């Protein structure tokens, strides 16, 4: 149950979730532009590739849950990524109704390049913080993520 008790400090305006969303949207827009220019794929398409790369053989439903992308959008991205040769759909031998998603060699290559670009962009993004601020920020994010999971 969420406690609505007042805290002993004033909350900044607007709400924290809105400010987090603003930062997220700005970072995603910039990253998506770089990925589109360098790799020809947007950030959500790359999230699909990364998620499948992390768990080869997953179903599209599991992909939707793991990537936090709505099922209809996952299906759209999968059609494109399969057609372009980044992902393949394999029928499971134990159950021919089940389709397992896997990266192709092309998908593995683009994932490695996207990871490299992502690391560069993340370092640039986080360079706005001092090492001390980054340490506190990471602790706070971990703590808030844990709260959201409970």
Image (cartoon, rainbow, N blue to C red):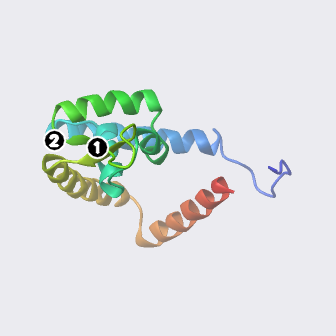
Q: Nearer the viewer, residue 71 or 21?
A: 71
Q: Percent x, y for residue 13?
A: 65, 40
Report the quarter where the C terminus lies: bottom right
Q: Is residue 99 above or below residue 147?
A: above
Q: Which residue is mark 1?
A: 46
Q: Rounded to the nearest whole Å, what is the CA distance between mark 1 and mark 2?
A: 9 Å
Residue occupying image coordinates x 43% and y 27%: 72
Q: Residues within 10 Å of mark 2 (few under 14, many from 20)?
A: some
CB-based contact (under 8 Å), mark 1 and mark 2: yes
Q: Earlier in the sequence, mark 1 or mark 2?
A: 2
Q: Residues within 10 Å of mark 1 (few under 14, many from 20)?
A: many
Q: Percent x, y for residue 35?
A: 22, 41
Residue occupying image coordinates x 23% and y 35%: 81
Q: Name the mark on residue 70.
A: none
Q: Is residue 70 above or below residue 16?
A: above
Q: Percent x, y for residue 68?
A: 48, 42
Q: Which residue is mark 2?
A: 39
Residue occupying image coordinates x 40% and y 39%: 60
SS class of the residue under badge 2?
helix
Q: Nearer the viewer, residue 124 or 139?
A: 139
């Amino acid at each position: 149950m969420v406690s609505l008790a007042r805290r002993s400090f004033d909350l900044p305006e607007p709400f924290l979730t809105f400010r987090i969303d603003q930062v997220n949207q700005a970072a995603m827009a910039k990253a998506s532009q770089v990925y589109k220019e360098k790799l020809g794929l947007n950030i959500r398409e790359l999230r699909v590739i990364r998620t499948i790369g992390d768990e080869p053989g997953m179903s599209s439903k599991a992909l939707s849950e793991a990537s936090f992308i709505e099922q209809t959008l996952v299906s759209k991205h999968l059609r494109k990524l399969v057609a372009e040769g980044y992902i393949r759909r394999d029928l499971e031998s134990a159950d021919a109704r089940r389709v397992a998603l896997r990266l192709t060699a092309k998908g593995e290559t683009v994932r490695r390049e996207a990871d490299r670009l992502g690391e560069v962009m993340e370092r640039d993004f986080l360079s706005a913080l001092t090492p001390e601020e980054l340490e506190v920020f990471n602790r706070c994010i971990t703590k808030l993520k844990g709260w959201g999971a409970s």
